[in-house]
């Protein structure tokens, strides 16, 4: 579920609240004021593990080419055996 950052106009506290994208938070979790939350612009984040490895575009391209070459060899071999 997405997390959204809000600030309360009543108490001035910031809060991170999880809810669906078509919903809005109405009640401040700190002071329980109703209708006083303003959604703030926040950065995008995921809950993906921090240990994920970023690949360079060149590495991804090389992997794709190697995979495509292997698939072409397999298809050529299949055609040769059918003849």
Image (cartoon, helix red, strand yellow):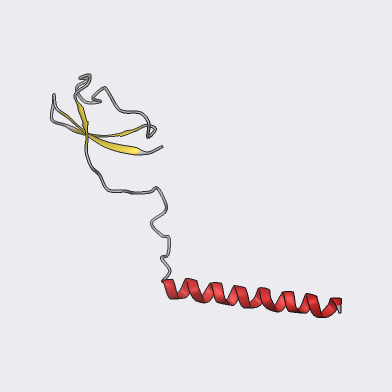
Left or right: residue 72 versus residue 35 is right
Left or right: residue 30 versus residue 17 is left
Quadrant containing the C terminus is bottom right
Extreme residue in the front direction: 83
Residue at image point 25% right, 25% down: 29
Residue at image point 77% right, 79% down: 77
Residue 67: image location, x then y, percent? 60, 73
Extreme residue in the right direction: 83
Residue nearest the viewer, comparing 13 with 35: 35
Residue 62: image location, x then y, percent? 51, 77
**The quarter of the displayed image where residue 39 is located:** top left
Left or right: residue 44 versus residue 47 is left
**The quarter of the displayed image where residue 76 is located:** bottom right
Counting the numbered discs, the total is 0
Residue nearest the viewer, comparing 51 with 72: 72
Residue at image point 30% right, 37% down: 4
**The quarter of the displayed image where residue 65 is located:** bottom right
Quadrant containing the N terminus is top left
Residue 70: image location, x then y, percent? 65, 76
Residue 6: image location, x then y, percent? 23, 34
Q: Is residue 12 positioned above or below 52 on the image?
A: above
């Amino acid at each position: 579920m997405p997390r959204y950052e809000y600030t309360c106009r009543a108490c001035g506290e910031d809060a991170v609240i999880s809810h669906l994208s078509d919903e809005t938070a109405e009640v401040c979790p700190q002071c329980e004021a109703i209708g006083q939350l303003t959604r703030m612009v926040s950065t995008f984040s995921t809950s993906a593990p921090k240990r994920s490895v970023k690949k360079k575009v060149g590495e991804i391209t090389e992997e794709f080419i190697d995979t495509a070459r292997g698939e072409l060899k397999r298809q050529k071999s299949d055609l040769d055996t059918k003849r």
